């Protein structure tokens, strides 16, 4: 994924509220399952880290790997993930996808 697509998705996520929370239990099967379901129905999802904040970057990478998604950004204690679904809810303009490739 190139930076133009990331910037587009970051702008699309700006108004979203976090719908998955990571608590003191960390990234366990319940969090992975919740993110997997959220990505299936929304494509673009924010995850809020309420605990484990010092390990946020590696945990976000682990979440992206386990859910087969892309980590779009980390701002504060909120990570944004994207995974395209069969419904193609978010239309990424072709002009952005081609730039830089």
Image (spheres, grey):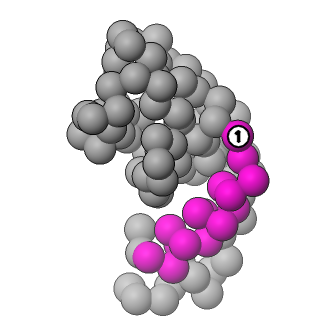
User: Which is nearer the eye, 99 or 30?
Assistant: 30
Q: Secondary structure at mark 1?
A: loop
Which residue, given by chain and number where applicable, does mark 1 sit on?
17
Q: Is residue 30 shown in magenta?
A: no
Which residue shows up at 40% across the image and 88% down it? Answer: 100
Which residue shows up at 42% across the image and 75% down it? Answer: 2
**Quadrant location of residue 63?**
top left
The residue carrying pointer 1 sits among few (fewer than 14), some (14 to 19) or many (20 or more) residues within 10 Å by Cα, namely: few
Residue 47 visible within the image:
yes
Give the x, y percent position of residue 77. 46, 41
Is residue 14 positioned above or below 24 on the image? below
Q: Which residues are magenta?
A: 3-17
Give the x, y percent position of residue 60. 35, 39
Which residue shows up at 66% across the image and 67% down it? Answer: 11
Is residue 77 positioned above or below 13 on the image? above
Give the x, y percent position of residue 47. 53, 35
Q: Quadrant of the N terminus?
A: bottom left
Residue 62 visible within the image:
no
């Amino acid at each position: 994924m190139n930076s133009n697509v990331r910037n587009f998705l970051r702008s699309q996520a700006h108004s979203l509220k976090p719908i998955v929370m990571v608590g003191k239990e960390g990234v366990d099967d319940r969090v992975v399952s919740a993110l997997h379901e959220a990505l299936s129905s929304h494509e673009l999802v924010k995850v809020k880290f309420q605990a484990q904040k010092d390990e946020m970057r590696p945990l976000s990478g682990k979440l992206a790997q386990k859910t087969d998604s892309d980590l779009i950004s980390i701002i504060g204690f909120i990570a944004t993930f994207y995974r395209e679904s069969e419904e193609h809810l978010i239309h990424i303009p072709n002009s952005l996808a081609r730039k830089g490739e």
